[in-house]
Image (cartoon, rainbow, N blue to C red):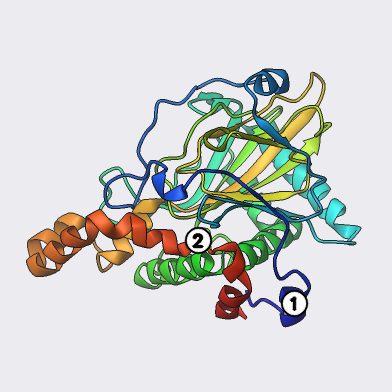
Amino acid sequence: YRIKGFVARKHAVPPSSSVGIDAESLPAAHGGWVARRTKSAARTYSLGELRELQFQEITWDGSTPKVITDAEDRVIVALAGRPVDDPTWGQAIDAMYNAASVVARQFKGPWNHRRGYYATVGVGVSFGGGQQAPQPLVTRGGVDRAMQAFIADPHVARVVGFVSSCFAFYAPRMYAHYRTTMDSVFHSLPHLSRLFPCSPFPAFNLNLGPQVCTRIHVDCANFPAGWCAVVAFGDFDYTAGGHLILWSLGLVVQFPPGAVILLPSAIVEHGNVPVRDGETRMSFTQYAAGGLFRWVHYGCQTERAVQLNQPETYQRIMDEAPSRWSRLMGLFSHLSELPHDRAMVS
């Protein structure tokens, strides 16, 4: 994706809200490739409960872009929204919902998992858990063919393309790092396939509901100095439910259907406010495992292989580990630097 000059000029610095937390203090693991597991609340919260806990509520129409910055002025969350003045966007979101509904009707379980009680299917490429190289995720629930149809749907591809443009626009350095890293993965392992050629994300979860509401959690295996992208869709009143809870930041954000939000899901505890009875809510979440970035950094091999075959390189990598997390913070753009950073992908 290349940022068009007139777009960058028109939206040079978006409106922002600041939180008094330094993102570098959030819980990445030693080495910075994944996040630390935290003892999360592991439950859902109503909007009333969050108000009693004095969470700051951000009202958002899902159209006007807005960013959330940390104490160091880093852009850590982007409320990217949707294409402006484009009536066909709603049609694309409706078509995406219909395609997801086909998958939902064929899903055979399981339903209960650590993020909540709802149907979810993961597809794409990941790395971790003792694997020797990146591998495709196993599609569960008996929906392989339905998921292939979902991926091939042109409306889904359109949404993915917009998500990619938002990623590049609000985190240009991070976006460039994702692109070069995933290019290395797929160049080194040509038998693996990208889900969407335009996207820097190698995997996604399709959360099928029918009332997707995640418990407070972190996605600790995701790349901690990176973003995941979430699109919500369905039929629900976003002022009454479906909000994105950014637990670590003390925020609860209105999240309308058809809107895009990007957040560092590995280090910020997050979840959703339940929607009301009779409403439907699904979501589409793109992400990248931190293990992929580690594998590429180690020369497209495992840590054990580097240790055995390249001891000097291994020692250098170990020596840089304590400071890596601080350096990876440079992937987040400072709000004032966004116009400059966008030149990287223009």
> Can the viewer see residue 48?
yes
Position of residue 197 measured from the top left corner of the image (x, y, whole percent): 58, 68
Q: Label 2 amino acid?
A: Phe
Count up the numbered dots. Answer: 2
Residue to which mark 2 is pinned: 332
Instruction: Please tell me in which quadrant of the rendered image residue 239 appears.
Output: top right
Compared to residue 112, the image places residue 183 above or below, namely below
Crowd around label 1: few <14 · some 14–19 · many ≥20 (10 Å): few
Q: Is residue 90 left or right of residue 72?
A: right
- Horizontal side of residue 106 vs 189, given as left or right: right
Q: Residue at x 34, y 71 (%)?
A: 188
Q: Name the image quarter holding the N terminus.
A: bottom right
- Measured in 3D between alpha carbons, the distance from the residue under mark 1 to the one under mark 2, in whole angstroms, is 20 Å
First-in-chain label (1 vs 2): 1
* Residue at x 25%, y 64% (from the top left corner): 298
Closest to the observer: 232 or 29?
A: 29
Q: Is residue 268 left or right of residue 24?
A: right
Q: Which of the 4 quarters of the picture holds residue 252?
A: top right
Relative height, residue 165 to residue 280 (above, below): below
Question: Where is mark 1, residue-wise?
Answer: 9
Residue 93: x and y in percent read: 79, 50
Are the residues flagged by discs 1 and 2 in contact, CB closer than 8 Å?
no
Does dot 1 land on a helix, a strand or a loop? Answer: helix
Identity of the amino acid at label 1?
A: Arg
Would residue 102 be visible to someone looking at this image? no
